Image: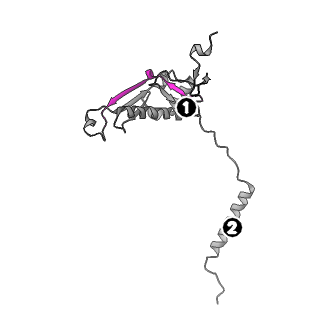
Amino acid sequence: MPSLRASGRCTRDLTGSWDTERVQPRNDLDLVVPPGPGLRHGLVVPTAELEERFTRAGGPGGQGVNTTDSRVELWWDPSTSTALTSAQQQRAAAALTPHLVGGRVRVVAAEHRSQRRNRKAARERLAGLLREALAPPAPARRATRPTRGSQRRRLDAKRRRSQLKSGRARPTGDAG
């Protein structure tokens, strides 16, 4: 049986030790989602699954704004992605519904003057969306009853407040 190093499933991490679990990008253009809740070892979306469109953006840029295609639209289809398992695809499809256009996720970045910075911003935004979408749901709240002491304190406070307010009333009387 070939070793893990020879098969390509084993990579070196930043410390130089061999890591068989962490997913590594194949090139600099792959979208890397760092490890987090729901993504124990991170996620790498290959560049082939991403589609980028460049258009002219409004806003600052002087004369270059009319000639430079700096606005970036990043498209990604979670249903056909090879980076996700089937369970992750279902969770992502449910969580990313507001961001889906024709079954694909659309992220737009146009806040920077350069196309390179907008590409980076769009990829960071998509990575953030994926991280949120693939995070496990929060545990359900367990209903608890108030303690006897807290009930007693609440009723005592109500009694004191009632006496205070009744003390403000006009005296009824035997003034005669």
Kindly indicate the quadrant of the structure image that contains residue 165. Answer: bottom right
Figure check: 23 above or below 111: above
Real-space Cα separation, disc 2 to disc 1, in angstroms: 50 Å
- Magenta stretch contains residue 41: yes
Disc number for residue 22? none
Q: Nearer the viewer, mark 2 or mark 1?
A: 1
Crowding at dot 2, Cα within 10 Å, few <14 / some 14-19 / many 20+, comes out as few
Figure check: 163 above or below 7: below
Between 124 and 95, the one lying in front of the other is 124
User: How far across and down, in percent of the image, does residue 63 sit?
Assistant: 24, 38
Kindly indicate the quadrant of the structure image that contains residue 116. Answer: top left
Q: Residue at x 53, y 33 (%)?
A: 131
- The stretch in magenta equals 39-57
**The C terminus lies in quadrant:** bottom right
Q: Residue at x 65, y 72 (%)?
A: 164
Label 1 belongs to which residue? 134
**The N terminus lies in quadrant:** top right
* Element on which disc 1 rests: helix
Q: Residue furthest top?
A: 1
Q: At label 2, which amino acid type do we have?
A: Arg
Q: Residue at x 26, y 32 (%)?
A: 67
> Is residue 127 visible to the viewer in this orientation of the structure?
yes
User: How far across and down, in percent of the image, does residue 39 sit?
Assistant: 57, 30
Crowding at dot 1, Cα within 10 Å, few <14 / some 14-19 / many 20+, comes out as many
* Element on which disc 2 rests: helix
Disc with the residue nearer the chain's start (2 vs 1)? 1
Q: At label 1, which amino acid type do we have?
A: Leu
- Magenta stretch contains residue 43: yes
User: How far across and down, in percent of the image, does residue 72 sit?
Assistant: 37, 32
> Is residue 102 visible to the viewer in this orientation of the structure?
no
Label 2 belongs to which residue? 159
